[in-house]
Amino acid sequence: MVKRGWKETDSDMDWDIHWSDRDWIIDHFDNAHFETWQRVNHYRNDRELCRKDLLIKNLKRQKRQLERDGSAEADAYEFFPDTFVLPREYAIFVETFKKAGATTATWIMKPIGKSQGRGIFLFRNLNDIRKWKSETRWKADNADVESYIVQRYICNPYLVGGKKFDLRIYALVTSFTPLKVYLHRSGFARFSNSRYSSLASDMANQYVHLTNVAVQKSADNYNKATGGKWGLRDLKLYLMSRHGVERTNQVFADIEDIVLRSLQSVQKVMIHDKHCFELYGYDIMIDDQLKPWLIEVNASPSLAANTDEDFSLKFRLLNDMFDIVDMEGRRTGEEMRIGGFDLMFDAANEGRGRKRRVEAGYVSTLGSETP
């Protein structure tokens, strides 16, 4: 922001753009009177997309609606694992658990309100969650019950050098009504420090199963030079060398589809406001069949950098984002690309962005060279 010549102010409302945290939005947004030019970096109820349980609820609802409508599009909503909210859906989960095989399927538990790998654990037997279930938070009359989601664990992740990874993809939404989305070409893959193992003896080893930097940086063999990351372009080139250009392009096109469909699933419930924009961090995992899976969406993706390359990526990301938000009034609004951001979807112009790229003969710009 300083590089752009902007100045910081401590005024409550005398500002042009407010880079706020979620608490400020919750506490002040509904009672604030914004001038026409003022912008804030969150939507009022972005938790519909970014809280784990609400994201799943909206994806399931969208899929059911498409099925009722007889739309073939419903089949495309198979990009998230079987997921249940506990304790509310415990009985349904147990039924699914038993059908899956009591000792063959692995499941992962995640608290809905925590991040950076906190509170996550894996299990294969219902007895393994007995301690969690017996605690006071499980009781129905406990108003402060802590909800978890339980998901079928992706046991066949794509491995590089024997190590598991997930992807961080950046999407910028400048409008939900009509939907307008940009995707940044840059991103990164976050690797585990330890080689992947599906053995029961390794289920509690977070360095094997969780790729969060907050977890991996405490490992003895953590690589500070790389931060345990590959750039998205590096990963794309690696996949091309192993599986060819066409198959790799399809993987990244599938990732774009996941981003778009997840946003479309929350359109009707998201409170749209012309003063809002939001940068989302999508966490995606690829399995050994090159199928991408949506893990979660972050409303406040970390902008802290742990390497020089990471700093450069995030600096460009923010600068490109502010170019799109365009407080200076330099843009026409018709641009297909601004910096590293490509217009992925513009509902006001019949999906302009994706349609034009397909007609031009290439499928996805994710992982492409950033100008």
Image: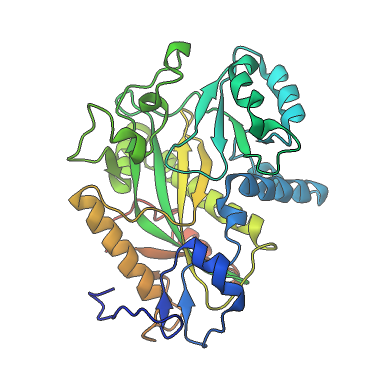
Residue 154 vs 340, above or below: the answer is above
Residue 298 locus on image (x, y percent):
48, 52
Residue 352 locus on image (x, y percent):
53, 69
Q: Is residue 104 left or right of residue 227?
A: right
Q: Quadrant location of residue 195?
A: top left
Residue 199 vs 50, above or below: the answer is above
Report the front residue among 111 and 237.
Answer: 111
Does any portion of residue 303 appear in the rendered image?
yes
The quadrant the C terminus occupies is bottom left
What is the number of callouts on the image? 0
Residue 324 locus on image (x, y percent):
40, 74
Q: Quadrant location of residue 325?
A: bottom left
Q: Give the colour scheme shown.
A: rainbow
The quadrant the N terminus occupies is bottom left
Residue 215 locus on image (x, y percent):
35, 35
Give me the residue at 47% from left, 50% from top. 282
Give me the residue at 62% from left, 49% from top. 55
Q: Is residue 160 left or right of residue 279?
A: left
Residue 337 vs 125, above or below: the answer is below
Q: Is residue 274 left or right of residue 196?
A: right
Give me the residue at 49% from left, 57% from top. 299
Does any portion of residue 43 appear in the rendered image?
no
Q: Quadrant location of residue 104?
A: top right
